[in-house]
Image (cartoon, helix red, strand yellow):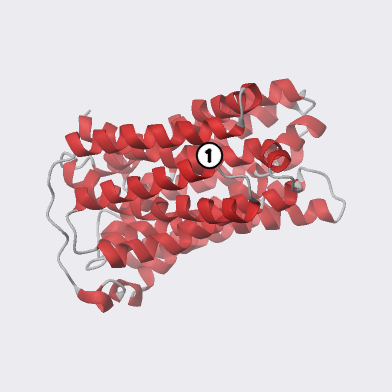
């Protein structure tokens, strides 16, 4: 495994910590900032908004720069936002700092995917991108539980100080291990968006938004489902979240290897089919602890199993705007996260039990499957690697 890919994974670990840890420390932050938990929830939304704004903005501003320089600049923005957040006591400033922290997220994945693709041996691009993305899954496995523990033991600010320090370490790793890479060909401002005239990127964006969003419909409410329906105690749910993080790690690497062997399109379709099975099984058998845990592992593995093939396909079908195309995967992922969490919560709002978000998620994934099948049929002749 190339050390340069490990350096890229350090960056995705940092981004994973910054994005997801807020969900587990929200009560501590709300108490510290003297606001309600729903108000503190705006800190999560601010990060997601930063991702959506930052991905295209950073790409447009920095598209003429060498790739390794862009990565270094993005990590500087990341560590600045996190260090500012560690000293913040005001909710409104916190929202600003979280927005800043989210700005480099999508662009880092976009640029990092291009770098990983260039560094990969022939026929191993999906696996290289999966290795880069593995930092995100490791953050879910060990980073977030550790962050929650630090917040409980010391302060929630400690985790953002850690993020800042990790950002500095990542900067050093990237500076030393990522080789000089020339800028992408300058296609001009309009050229960055020209690939969007084709149906291919829109189908891939729909596949990512709805397919992944379907999992977030259910996963956003995994704790009450496991507690109230499956019968696990709050202390056991912490261990279940670690198990879910481990499943994400396994699914991420498996998705990369399967994509290189069987093509990205087939891998995405197979993973989304497994998502449907997992969500429907959860809906019907959520009160059976063994099945609930098994389906949790299946669904979380598939959530990251589609990551590398989706990233690679959008990179392949965004000629002239590769950096923008790769960054849009993260925009679609975060859009699916936000919309899925909202729609998954609607049945609960109307008094239904916590297994119903899985049913809503099934409908989302079905739309994702339709998008995947349409894409594969339409572009199979154009690119045999689909």
Residue 274 image offset from top left, x and y in percent: 54, 42
Q: Residue at x 45, y 64 (%)?
A: 53
- Other residues around mark 1 within 10 Å, as few (<14) / some (14–19) / many (≥20): many
From the image, which quarter does the N terminus lie in? top left
Residue 341 image offset from top left, x and y in percent: 65, 52
Considering depth in this image, is 208 or 12 the residue closer to the camera? Answer: 12
Q: Is residue 317 left or right of residue 282?
A: left
Considering depth in this image, is 383 or 103 the residue closer to the camera? Answer: 103
Residue receiving disc 1 = 86
Quarter of the view holding residue 135? top left
Whether residue 271 appears in this view of the structure is yes
Q: Residue furthest right?
A: 351
Q: Residue at x 22, y 47 (%)?
A: 115
Q: Does residue 137 sit above or below 237 in this rendering?
A: below
Quarter of the view holding residue 259? top left
Residue 375 image offset from top left, x and y in percent: 40, 63
Whether residue 135 appears in this view of the structure is no
Quarter of the view holding residue 377? bottom left
Q: Does residue 258 sit above or below 290 in this rendering?
A: below
Q: Does residue 110 sit above or below 129 in this rendering?
A: below
């Amino acid at each position: 495994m190339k050390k340069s890919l490990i350096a890229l994974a350090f960056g995705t670990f940092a981004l994973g910590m910054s994005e997801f840890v807020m969900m587990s420390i929200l009560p501590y932050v709300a108490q510290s900032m003297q606001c309600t938990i729903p108000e503190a929830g705006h800190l999560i939304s601010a990060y997601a908004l930063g991702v959506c704004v930052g991905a295209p903005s950073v790409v447009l501003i920095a598209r003429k720069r060498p790739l390794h320089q862009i990565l270094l600049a993005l990590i500087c923005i990341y560590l600045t936002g996190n260090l500012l957040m560690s000293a913040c006591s005001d909710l409104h400033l916190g929202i600003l700092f979280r927005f800043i922290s989210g700005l480099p997220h999508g662009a880092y994945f976009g640029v990092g995917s291009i770098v990983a693709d260039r560094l990969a041996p022939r026929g191993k691009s999906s696996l290289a991108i999966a290795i880069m993305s593995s930092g995100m899954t490791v953050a879910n496995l060990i980073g977030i539980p550790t962050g929650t523990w630090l917040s409980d033991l010391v302060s929630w600010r400690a985790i953002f100080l850690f993020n800042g320090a990790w950002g500095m370490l990542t900067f050093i790793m990237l500076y030393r291990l990522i080789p000089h890479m020339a800028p992408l060909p300058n296609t001009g401002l309009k050229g960055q968006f020209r690939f969007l005239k084709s149906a291919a990127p829109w189908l891939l964006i729909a596949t990512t938004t709805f397919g992944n969003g379907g999992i977030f419909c259910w996963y956003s409410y995994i704790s009450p489902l496991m507690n109230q329906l499956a019968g696990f105690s709050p202390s056991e749910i912490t261990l279940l979240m670690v198990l879910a993080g481990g499943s994400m790690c396994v699914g991420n690497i498996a998705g990369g290897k399967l994509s290189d062997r069987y093509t990205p399109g087939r891998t995405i379709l197979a993973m989304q089919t497994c998502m449907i099975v997992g969500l429907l099984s959860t809906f019907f058998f959520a009160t059976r602890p063994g099945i609930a845990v098994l389906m949790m592992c299946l669904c979380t593995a598939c959530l990251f199993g589609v990551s590398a093939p989706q990233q690679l396909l959008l990179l392949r079908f965004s000629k002239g705007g590769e950096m923008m195309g790769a960054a849009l995967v993260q925009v679609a992922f975060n859009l699916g996260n936000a919309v899925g969490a909202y729609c998954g919560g609607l049945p609960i709002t109307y008094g239904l039990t916590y297994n119903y978000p899985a049913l809503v998620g099934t409908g989302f994934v079905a739309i994702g499957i339709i998008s995947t099948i349409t894409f594969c049929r339409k572009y199979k002749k154009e690119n045999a690697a689909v």
